[in-house]
Image (tube, rainbow, N blue to C red):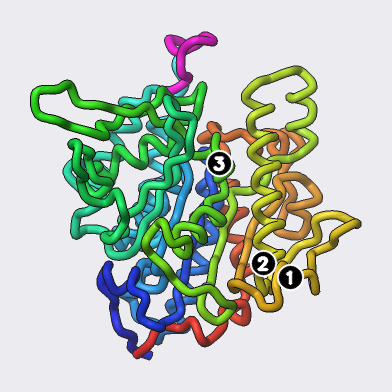
Amino acid sequence: MAYKRKSLRDHFAVDGDPKRILALDGGGLRGILTVGALARLEALLRDRHGGDPDFRLSHYFDLIAGTSTGAIIAAALALGWTVEQVRQQYFSLGQKVFEKSLLRRGLLRAKYDHEALAKALKRLYGAKTTLGGGELQTGLLVVTKRLDSGSPWPIGNNPMGMYFAGRDGGTVGNGDYPLWQVVRASTAAPSFFDPEEITIARKAGQKPASGQFVDGGVSPFNNPSLQALMYATVDGYRVGWPLGADRVLLVSLGTGAADPAVERSAVAAKHAVAALASLMNDCAVQQETLLQWLSASPTARVFDREIGDLSGNLAGPEPLLSYLRYNVTLNAEGLDGLLPQMPSARALASLSAMDAPDNMDLLHAIGVALGKRDLDPEHFPPGFDLKP
């Protein structure tokens, strides 16, 4: 089936067409697991639209949101990359950026060189590509956190957004932010990379004002799904898509949930980074709970014995959206039956790490297997297919 390609403004337009959101979690180098699952998603949707070899996820999704490593992937997809292109570049980036150095040890210094990451992102996206540039084919939302104000900053490319263009007082518009720098800010995980400084205002005769930005994962939105839904539907963001199970489809992909047993042992040892990871996991579970409560979801999972999967417990009389969530817990129970052979106990214990390049091949294989097992064509209502 041939389909009509949309411009960026078409993707954002409130035109009566159903809208589709793709949300990609943070999780360091575990993002390669997401890439593995995305290969299945791309193939499934390509088949739904006639097998066009030029099909891209940027054609189907009207908004692609990402936090941290998810932002790296989201930006590439919004530029029109294939998942295979993302896979190749992600493996290369992971090996180069997460190279350990004895010179960077110590409590007061970031473990990895942020300049190496910045250089890699400039190469990937182009140093002069901005959020307002014509290179982006669809909506993009990158979740960051502004450290000096303590507030989450969702930065998007909606041309109608309040802060997309510059404002009185010399405010620099989001559309003028370099894409590489916004993504770099979203990946600036505390202790892993130094914060990213972005110029947010310029006024003649005065020193430019800047903000210090860190990983969006230290906000409640390491899983950007709820923030993406709010961005698309809350009036203040000036997108304004109508809600409804037949109007909004949200597809959310995780990076593999860290093994709770690994986290508990680390928290017991008062390891600050692991404690932060545990808090991030709590926020992610809360978001999944809320989204299942608000939606019609064939992938709904059981949270606990008390509330189950929230079936029959909608927050209102009708579902506000259609919601799909795909993820896996990185332990023996979660991986049981997913791979031809269960990894060793030592390999399993290391999978929860966010900065282990040696794990990328296995994590990618897990993502591919997850996609084949869990992504079902029946999950995607025909009403969301692209129009001829």
Q: CA distance from mark 2 to mark 1?
A: 6 Å
Mark 1, other Cα within 10 Å: few <14 / some 14–19 / many ≥20: some
Mark 3, other Cα within 10 Å: few <14 / some 14–19 / many ≥20: many
Q: Which mark is residue 242?
A: none
Asked if residue 212 lies left or right of residue 307, the reply is left
Asked if disc 3 and disc 1 are in contact, CB closer than 8 Å, the reply is no
Q: Which mark is residue 314?
A: 1
Asked if residue 238 lies left or right of residue 222, the reply is left
Q: Which residue is mark 3?
A: 27
Considering the image in quadrants, where does the N terminus appear? Answer: bottom left
Hey, what amino acid is under mark 1? Leu
- Check disc 2 and report its element: helix, strand or loop: helix
Closer to viewer: mark 2 or mark 3: 2
Earlier in the chain: of badge 2 and badge 1, it is 2
Closer to viewer: mark 3 or mark 1: 1
Q: Which mark is residue 294?
A: 2
Residue 256 drawn at (x, y percent)? 63, 48
- Check disc 3 and report its element: helix, strand or loop: loop
Farthest residue, direction front = 168
Q: CA distance from mark 2 to mark 3?
A: 25 Å
At horizontal 79% and vertical 47% (from top left) the residue drawn is 332
Asked if disc 2 and disc 1 are in contact, CB closer than 8 Å, the reply is yes
Residue 358 drawn at (x, y percent)? 54, 35
Magenta segment includes 109: yes
Magenta segment includes 313: no
Q: Which residues are magenta?
A: 102-112
Q: Quadrant of residue 317?
A: bottom right
The dominant secondary structure in magenta is loop
At horizontal 35% and vertical 32% (from top left) the residue drawn is 117
Hey, what amino acid is under mark 3? Gly
Q: CA distance from mark 3 to mark 1?
A: 30 Å
At horizontal 90% and vertical 57% (from top left) the residue drawn is 305
